[in-house]
């Protein structure tokens, strides 16, 4: 997970970026939506991130989770696994990726400049859920101040999902290049990359974005899953 810097804090790297002074994360029930649509994205090189289903065989995650800095290339799709509803060694279903797509604008060597495109879509070799067990994508950006939740397989609780169930949208931030990131104040740290930023619409759960950035204090930013070129909150 990329950590955003401020001049006052750039010299001190926190052990758990994105977590505030009062850690609000809680345990969740992995047998129920939205958590049952979340899973661990792991690679055969030892990488670990979070991902979630938007279709029975389609997973969204963060693109930086699939990049190998040592080689300067993305990992081979077949070396990426998705374990739905993973919890302490148990999981509801498992499949390998057969291919994945990363926006061409994303450059892992220029993470800060291209963070608004830090997402990857994995296509699995077989379905790991029914349509009803997947998460719909919001067709609009969230309104600042609206309630959201965020949880994933984080560095200090890597075997279970922990979630901040009481956080909110801080704003819709446009980068210097005009691209959109969704700022939030959810407690989430390394390992939550690729987790869904979730809200409630029409009585059900919906995904606003993919967790990509952590602040030096509480909160971070998510990448929208919709084309935001002409969209306003």
Image (tube, helix red, strand yellow):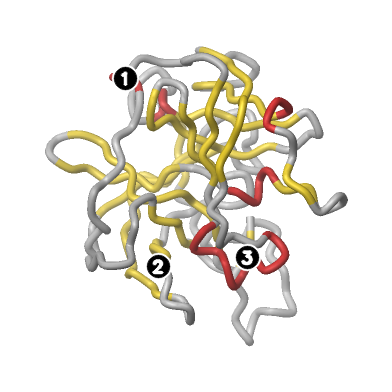
Q: Nearer the viewer, mark 3 or mark 2?
A: 2
User: Is 179 on the left-hand or right-hand side of 13?
Assistant: left
Residue 149: x and y in percent read 36, 46
Work out whether mark 3 precedes mark 2 in sequence or the reverse, and give the earlier one. Answer: 3
Tell me whether circle 2 and circle 1 mark residues in contact (CB < 8 Å). Answer: no
Q: Pointer 3: what residue?
A: 3
Estimate the x, y position of residue 190 in percent, counting from the top left: 63, 50
Dot 3 falls on a residue whose secondary structure is strand
For residue 131, the mark is: 1
**Which comes before the other along the chain, label 2 or label 1?**
1
Q: What's the CA distance linking mark 3 and mark 2?
A: 17 Å
User: Residue 111 versus residue 216: which sits nearer the camera?
Assistant: 111
Label 2: which secondary element? strand
Q: Is residue 146 rendered to the left or right of residue 70?
A: left
Depth check, front residue: 165 or 214: 214
Q: Is residue 32 above or below residue 108?
A: above
Q: Quadrant of the C terminus?
A: bottom left
Quadrant for residue 9, please give it: bottom right
Q: Residues within 10 Å of mark 1 (few under 14, many from 20)?
A: some
Q: Nearer the viewer, residue 54 or 16?
A: 54
Q: Are marks 1 and 3 in contact (CB under 8 Å)?
A: no
- Disc 3 crowd, CA 10 A, few/some/many (<14, 14-19, 20+): many
Sequence-wise first label, 1 or 3: 3
The residue to which callout 2 is attached is 180
Q: Residue at x 58, y 37 (%)?
A: 100
Kindly state the secondary structure of the residue where label 1 is placed.
helix
Which residue sits at x=63%, y=55%? 1
Q: Gap between marks 2 and 1, in whole Å?
A: 29 Å
Q: Are marks 3 and 2 in contact (CB under 8 Å)?
A: no
- Report the label total: 3
Determine the residue located farthest toward the bottom in the rendered image: 7
């Amino acid at each position: 997970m990329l950590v955003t810097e401020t001049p006052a804090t750039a010299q001190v790297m926190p052990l758990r970026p994105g977590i505030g002074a009062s850690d609000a994360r809680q345990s969740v029930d992995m047998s129920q939506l939205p958590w049952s649509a979340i899973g661990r994205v792991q690679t055969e090189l030892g990488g670990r991130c979070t991902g979630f289903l938007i279709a029975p065989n389609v997973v969204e995650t963060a693109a930086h989770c699939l990049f190998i800095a040592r080689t300067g290339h993305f990992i081979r799709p077949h070396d990426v696994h998705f374990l739905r509803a993973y919890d302490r060694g148990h999981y509801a279903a498992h499949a390998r990726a057969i291919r994945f797509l990363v926006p061409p604008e994303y450059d892992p060597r220029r993470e800060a400049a291209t963070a608004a495109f830090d997402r990857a879509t994995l296509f699995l070799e077989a379905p790991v859920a029914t349509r009803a067990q997947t998460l719909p994508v919001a067709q609009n950006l969230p309104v600042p101040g609206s309630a959201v939740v965020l949880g994933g397989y984080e560095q200090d609780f890597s075997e279970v999902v922990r979630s901040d169930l009481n956080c909110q949208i801080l704003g819709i931030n446009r980068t210097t290049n005009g691209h959109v990131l969704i700022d939030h104040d959810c407690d989430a740290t390394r390992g939550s990359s690729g987790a869904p930023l979730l809200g409630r619409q029409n009585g059900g759960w919906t995904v606003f974005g993919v967790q990509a950035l952590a602040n030096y204090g509480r909160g971070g930013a998510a990448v929208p899953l919709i084309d935001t070129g002409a969209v306003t909150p």
